[in-house]
Image (spheres, helix red, strand yellow):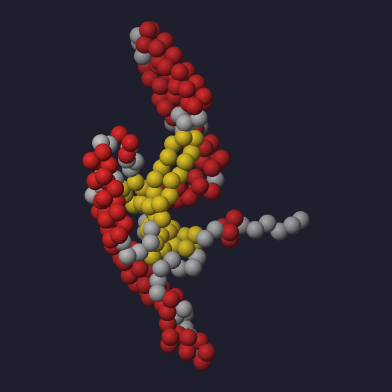
Amino acid sequence: MPKTTAAQQFLAVEGIREDAVILKNGELRVVIMCSALNFALKSGDEQDAIIFQYQNFLNALDFSVQFVIHSRRLNIAPYLDALKERQKDEDNELLKIQITEYSEFIRTFVDITNIMSKTFYVIVPFTPAILEQKGGFLGGIGSLLGLNRKTTDTEQQNSFEQHKNQLWQRVDTIVGGLQRFGVRSAPLNTEELIELFYGLYNPTEFEKTATSPPENR
């Protein structure tokens, strides 16, 4: 029987810790969720102001960022379940009929138009210095002489805290820059990051969990 390989071995993510994604190469990432901005509904002057502020935002950055748009077919099952529960509690027969017709309209409309829900993210990176990743110049000499030692848990924790603090300074810069042209944003916490990655790598299972009705307690 062929030996199976764990899916985690093919992922670049080592783990999630204190609201930061840790990659296997030692780099850190923070994922910021952003609100949408309906640019087409803005007046000409407002559009020019947004473009100008966006240009200033990009020109002010001294580090790279990644913009990600996650598209997924709109899941209306929880909304329809809520309507069904509302219908059960309704005493007015006319309103019950209207809720039924409205639910059917929403279900048919979404099926025909294939509406997609979009979520917007900004990925903020932090890469430790090359010498720091390799153990530094002295670390290289120590390796040749066989004098290198393993870092202690305290040293690793201190190093992580330093990197996280520098990364969070970048996050504050991004959040403040986006706010200047009307985009609200917030970094995802550890629980939200786990849910995000689970949904990305297990879309079918995630959809089952999201659409299944809640259990009676």
| In the depicted structure, whether residue 120 falls above or below residue 217 | below
Q: Quadrant of the C terminus?
A: top left
Instruction: Specify whether 89 is left or right of 201.
Output: left
Of residues 77 and 47, the one drawn nearer to the viewer in this rendering: 47
Q: Can residue 190 be seen in this view?
A: no
Q: Residue furthest bottom?
A: 145
Is residue 74 visible to us here?
Answer: yes
Query: Which x, y percent locates residue 75?
Result: 47, 32
Answer above or below: position of 210 versus 2.
above
Vertical placement of 70 versus 92: above or below?
below
Query: Residue at 43% of width from left, 85% of height from top?
Result: 137
Query: Can you give x and y, in whole percent of width and height, for residue 120 in the image?
Result: 39, 45
Residue drawn where x is 50% and y is 30% of the image = 114
Q: Identify the residue at image location x=38%, y=58%.
A: 65
Q: Residue sitting at 54 percent across and 42 percent down? A: 203
**What percent of the width, then of the height, locates residue 39?**
32, 39
